[in-house]
Amino acid sequence: MKENITASKIEKWIFYILQKLVKGKFVITEEMKLHNSIVLCRVFLLMDKTHALLVHDSYANQRALFYEMRHLKLERNIATKDSCLNTKCSYLFPSQIQMDTTIRRISRMLSSSRNEMHIYPNSKGFLTGAMALIHNCSSYIDCLREFPDGWCIPGSIEYLKQLHFKNLGAQYIIVIEKHGIFKRLLEDRFVHYLPSILICGQGYPSVATKFLFQRIASELRLPCLGLVDYNPHGLALLQTYRNPTEKETSDPEKELTCSSRNDEFSHIYWLGLHFSQLSHLNLWDKFRKPLTTRDQVLLAKLRTQLRTQAENHQAVLEYELSAMQDGKVELQAIYSLGHSYLSRTYLPFAIFHYEDLVPSI
């Protein structure tokens, strides 16, 4: 097993370092670059923690490790000019930067990925709704009861692969671009009003968030809907959920060139915002902003790519993309229509007519 191999690598490295220290030789290698005692202590402590994770088959994210070790200090005796010894005390992990750097250093030393070390990146996505998470057929998590503010999606793909899902009455899967909109729907108890599953990637989703979306869509077989800003990046964002890559990219324009397709996820219906909706609600003139140069470049790529897709919605799609040339509007514009208008009026109407909307393909 990979866990046993990685644990063995850690044991060998610790033995090697101790051998060098016993002989009075300081450990400096190209892989480690352990140039001072603080760096050496960080590596030792984190290797010990990683070994414990592997032995107990448990996982931890980078942020949690930082908070667990941020209180640790190193005391050193420093000689002054008058030959006196002063004790200097310093934190081993004064910020998240030192933790992240040490993790990368150990990963290089072991030639192992973070997943193989049972360490995953900090969460960037959230999940809630009428569903339960089942881990290894043992632990059972009711998302609404146990995580009323949303379940933080872990960054470990290996952990997500072990999950199974039980539908507790959800009728739809809704992908949401912005965390603020996600939180507003939670405050309005939207998933109680209209049983559904909400997934938020806080902007462009991480690899783990995209992977989880595909797993849920594959197992539960529910209609998938997307709620994003009315701008080119909103549409590009929906496409990233259908075109997950092995490595996360921060460039959405590169995502558009991804050729991998999975027929099981052939439709994520573009729920909103639409130009037609904005016009009907008198929001277009009030909240419209001009497109940036980057927006215009991305829109041109989208029009080229989508022109041969969405066969049953060609005219509607072309109309929406043509109108987008004149400006963009953020989802928060809907707040101007009333505190609960988004959850009680706008979304229910759009969802009940989702089959008439444009699928993002």
Image (cartoon, grey):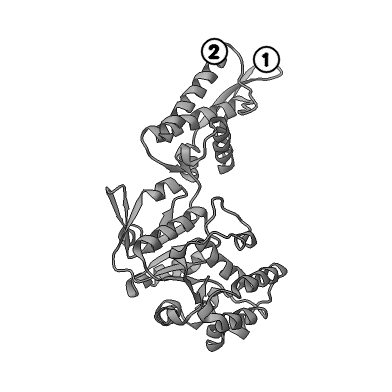
Q: Is residue 65 left or right of residue 131?
A: right
- Image position of 249 with respect to 190: above or below: above
Question: Residue flagged by tag 2: what amino acid is it?
Answer: Val
In the picture, the disc for residue 83 is 1
* Disc 2 element: helix
- Look at 50% across and 55% down and name the residue there: 124
The mark nearer the N terminus, 1 or 2, is: 2
Q: Position of residue 147 (x, y in %)?
A: 35, 58
- Image position of 172 with respect to 341: above or below: above
Q: Residues within 10 Å of mark 1 (few under 14, many from 20)?
A: few
Q: Residues within 10 Å of mark 2 (few under 14, many from 20)?
A: few
- Look at 44% across and 59% down and name the residue there: 214
Q: Quadrant of residue 253?
A: bottom right
Q: Is residue 275 in view? A: no
In the picture, the disc for residue 22 is 2
Q: Is residue 121 left or right of residue 250?
A: left
